[in-house]
Image: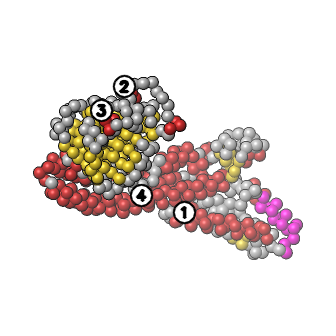
Amino acid sequence: MIKAHNTLLLLSSRTLYRRFNLKRIGLSHTMTEDRGICDLAVVSLQDNEPEADIEDRESTACHQRKTDSKQPEDTSYHRLNGGTDNVDESGHAVALTSTNNPKSDADPSQMTCVDHDSELDWFCSSEGKLICSHCAIVGPCQDHMVTPLGTQATTVRNQLVDICEKMQMQALRIERFISQTLSVKEKAIQADASAARERVLAQVSAVREALDEEEQRLLEAVQREQERVEQCLLTQRAHWSQALTSLSSTRTNLVHTLTHSQDAELVTSSQQINDRVEEAEGVGEPRDTEQLNLSSDCSDSRLMQGLWASALLLGPSAHGPANLRFQERSVSTMLSLSADECTLTFLTKRARQSPPYDPARFDCWPNALGTLAISSETHSWVLDVGQSAAYKVGVCYASMDRKGSGNGARLGYNDRSWVLSHYEGDFTFCHAGRHTSLHVIRRPRHVGILVDWPSQTLLFYDPDSYCVLHAVSHHFTAPLLPACAVADRSVTLLH
């Protein structure tokens, strides 16, 4: 009997909890107006009540439920309802049903089993349809998963409560994204764009004569970037406003279904409910992305960063040869050439081989030449020197010696080669045996070489910072070939 009282308290607590959740998500309708969550049918037992009286009372209650066609009851379930409990003179609770039962307004022909002429007060989950108690006990659904109609409706309502609560939280997040994040972005974009313009104008003003065209380009780039971000903000606002409207509409429809649908209509409209839920789940979550920020790249200019590198380095005529490779015939026996002919690797004595004789091959110095002969226009290329502690990069005439250990075949030690040399941390420019020490603040991982044939200028620079390492003007009398020497690790041509 203590167990029966505990069951009553548990069912009552669950009813109050579900009603509290319904009110919390904005449903102020009384659930008893739509048949209620379920009907209340409880028989309390007293500790000193004889078992015979209990059996008589249960028998009487069972007989009364069978004869009452308006209030069919299932003896396997206690139903909760918006009605109230009555107590007789002996202190026993009697079963009451709600007076606001939507079934009383339903069409009897639609709520009666055509096979057994009984009320359709059960739901077959296996077939997804309403059935009567005879169908559930001895009919075609006796082996199926069946549930009292009120219990099934309660389950569906509980699911809808959870769904609507999630939608409400999602709607709040979207509203907060629109009102806070997007609004802040709209205000910040003006300050960011203004700061970018100031940086551009301050840098351009120092070299106005040489950078008038660049100034205009950068200002237009900032303007385009600002317009792009503003357009993104407008698109985001329009998208999420539409998503919020759609989500609110779907939630309103589900709330209407939850509060105004009869049990039979509610449990048979699962497909429609699932479609609306799927539509709401497709809305997604708003996210703040980099596309909503002004890119700092729009106000950066390689030309201004490497201004003293000259306009030839970064102007429209500065371009690197796309097909530049190392000549396999010229590669020293002290080096290995990669399959793509772009990487030179220094070999130890044990790893060296003796290839067939070739007059174009260096045999005593670890040198190699490029495939492009430069005799016009402007050309540039970049080499990845990595962690190599000993290398030379530059240009030379094709007539440079290839054989022997003399200075004629040694890069930088004759008047036919011009190279930037790095050896054990020191950087020097070498030509005709003369060495010019270079002050390099940061050891570059890449070295760029630019040859402007019209102005007869050779320039070495750091392509990562566009800092000029060294520049030299010389009257070149013959085509120039890219040249490289490696005495430690590897050097790679980049494209």
Return the residue at label 4. 174
Q: Earlier in the sequence, mark 1 or mark 3?
A: 1
Q: Residue 210: percent from the left, percent from the top?
A: 14, 49
Q: Amino acid at mark 3?
A: Met
Nearest the viewer among 259 and 341 is 341
Q: Say which element carries label 4.
A: helix
Mark in front: 2 vs 1 = 2
Task: Give the quarter of the image for residue 78.
Answer: bottom right
Q: Residue 3: percent from the left, percent from the top?
A: 78, 68
Badge 3: how crowded within 10 Å, few (<14), some, or many (20+)? some
Residue 117 is left or right of residue 232, and the answer is right
- Residue shown at 65% from the left, 65% from the top: 14
Quadrant showing the C terminus: top left
Can residue 221 be seen here? The reply is: no
Boundaries of the magenta span: 48-62
Compared with 192, 449 (above or below) is: above
Residue 462 is left or right of residue 270, and the answer is left
Q: Earlier in the sequence, mark 4 or mark 2?
A: 4
Q: Amino acid at mark 4?
A: Ile
Return the residue at label 2. 359
Return the residue at label 1. 22
Q: Residue 425: percent from the left, percent from the top?
A: 38, 53
Q: Residue 164: percent from the left, percent from the top?
A: 51, 57
